Image: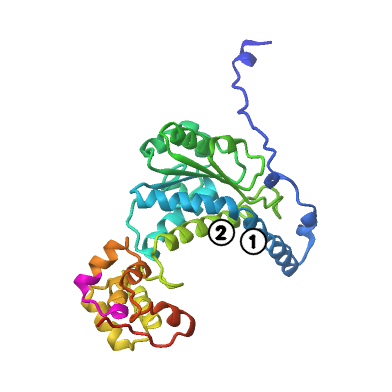
């Protein structure tokens, strides 16, 4: 063997994964021979299987939601860690939970392998860097929750993050589409939606990504419901940061109270655009100062605040209003 041959760099390792997401789908082997509409019907048929697999993951996801609720109430943070499509789904969920539920920035935090640059331009080798995941998880503490998201269940970046989070004493969660995920041993909670082979082999931006979106949406939404950031099924803690959202605030206030537009508009103005405060004022008859204290005592929950104010003479107005949408403005005294 020549010296030149000996000095040649070896080819990078290419580990194969046993994940079903990487297998070939027998239902779509002829997809490249079909007319456009039939291609779309095949993709749609595969997508239709996702919700059922997500449903099977709900018992474990419910445990995660309760853990998140306790974490947030105690002042902890929820950290998402992912790469590629999984990471982008995490960034989207963490960003949208803020305006939707009026949550402070820094409660849900998404860490994406490769950073902001990787959101719009693929940085494929970043996911192979375990030390990068370890570094990104340096801010995780024992009061936090670390959620690793990887369709294959083997991404080194996520492995580094979950390992570091576990060493810090944080609760750890793995969200995956691989029921035999190698990283499951790093997670206290393993949330798996076994979406199986993709329509295009290995393209986990399809069913696996859809499952991830559904699971993360469900996690954050259910946590916000349990934290009292909805009233009935209305988003009463959303921030009125633009014209569309201010219009939505007004609609929600009218729907929840039965009051007319001018009354709701005036109450929102009195409460400086705080929808939950305006809602409690209209339902209880309290002035903004007293209503703000009642909300604070109820950890921000309108229904919780009303429950503390309920007497036999003044029943909870939510029961009738939520079912009939009839006007139900409740007054004390």
Q: What is the number of the mark on residue 214?
A: 2
Residue in the foreground of this view, choosing between 45 and 167: 167
In the picture shown, does residue 157 fall above or below 2? Answer: below
Extreme residue toward the front, this view: 312
Question: Mark 2 or mark 1: which comes first in sequence?
Answer: 1
Q: Quadrant of the C terminus?
A: bottom left
**Residue 148 x/y as whole percent:** 51, 43
**Which quadrant of the figure has residue 2?**
top right
Question: Dot 2: few (<14), some (14–19), or many (≥20) neighbours within 10 Å?
Answer: some
Task: Classify residue 240 as left or right of residue 24.
Answer: left
Callout 1 crowding tier (Cα within 10 Å): few <14, some 14–19, many ≥20: some
Taking depth in this image into account, of 152 and 260 the one nearest to the observer is 260
Q: Is there CB contact under 8 Å for labels 2 and 1?
A: yes
Query: Residue 61: x, y in percent?
Result: 55, 52
Q: Left of 22 or right of it: where is 283?
A: left
Residue at left offset 71%, top offset 60%: 46
Residue 112, located in which quarter of the rendered image?
top left
On residue 51, the disc is: 1
User: Which residue appears at 65% of the width and 55% of the height?
Assistant: 56
Residue found at the very far left of the displayed protein: 289
Where are the magenta residues, as a range? 282-291
Estimate the spatial distance between the alpha carbons at disc 2 and disc 1, rounded to whole Å.
8 Å
Q: Is residue 284 magenta?
A: yes
Residue 49 at x, y percent in the picture: 69, 60
Q: Secondary structure at mark 2?
A: helix
């Amino acid at each position: 063997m020549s010296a030149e041959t000996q000095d040649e760099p070896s080819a990078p390792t290419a580990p194969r994964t046993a994940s079903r997401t990487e297998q070939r789908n027998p239902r779509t082997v002829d997809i490249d021979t079909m007319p456009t509409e039939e291609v779309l019907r095949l993709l749609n048929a595969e997508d239709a299987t996702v919700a059922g697999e997500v449903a099977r993951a709900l018992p474990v996801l419910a445990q995660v939601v309760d853990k998140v609720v306790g974490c947030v109430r105690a002042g902890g943070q929820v950290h998402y860690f992912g790469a590629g499509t999984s990471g982008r789904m995490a960034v989207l969920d963490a960003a949208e939970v803020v305006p939707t539920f009026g949550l402070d920035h820094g409660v849900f935090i998404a860490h994406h392998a490769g950073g902001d640059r990787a959101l719009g331009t693929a940085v494929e080798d970043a996911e192979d860097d375990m030390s990068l995941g370890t570094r990104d998880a340096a801010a995780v503490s024992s009061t936090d929750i670390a959620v690793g998201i990887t369709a294959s269940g083997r991404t080194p970046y996520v492995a580094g993050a979950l390992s570091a989070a576990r060493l810090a004493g944080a609760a750890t969660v793995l969200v995956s589409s691989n029921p035999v995920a190698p990283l499951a041993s790093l997670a206290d909670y393993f949330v798996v939606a076994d979406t199986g082979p993709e329509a295009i082999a290995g393209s986990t931006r399809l069913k696996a990504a859809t499952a991830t979106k559904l699971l993360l949406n469900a996690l954050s939404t259910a946590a916000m419901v349990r934290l009292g950031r909805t009233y009935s099924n209305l988003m009463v803690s959303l921030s009125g940061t633009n014209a569309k959202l201010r219009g939505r605030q007004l609609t929600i206030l009218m729907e929840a109270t039965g009051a007319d537009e001018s009354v709701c508009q005036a109450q929102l103005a009195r409460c400086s655009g705080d929808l939950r405060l305006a809602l409690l004022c209209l339902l209880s008859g309290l002035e903004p100062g007293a209503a703000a204290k009642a909300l604070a005592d109820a950890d921000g929950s309108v229904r919780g605040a009303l429950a503390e104010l309920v007497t036999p003479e003044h029943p909870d107005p939510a029961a009738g209003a939520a079912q009939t949408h009839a006007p139900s403005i409740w007054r004390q005294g």
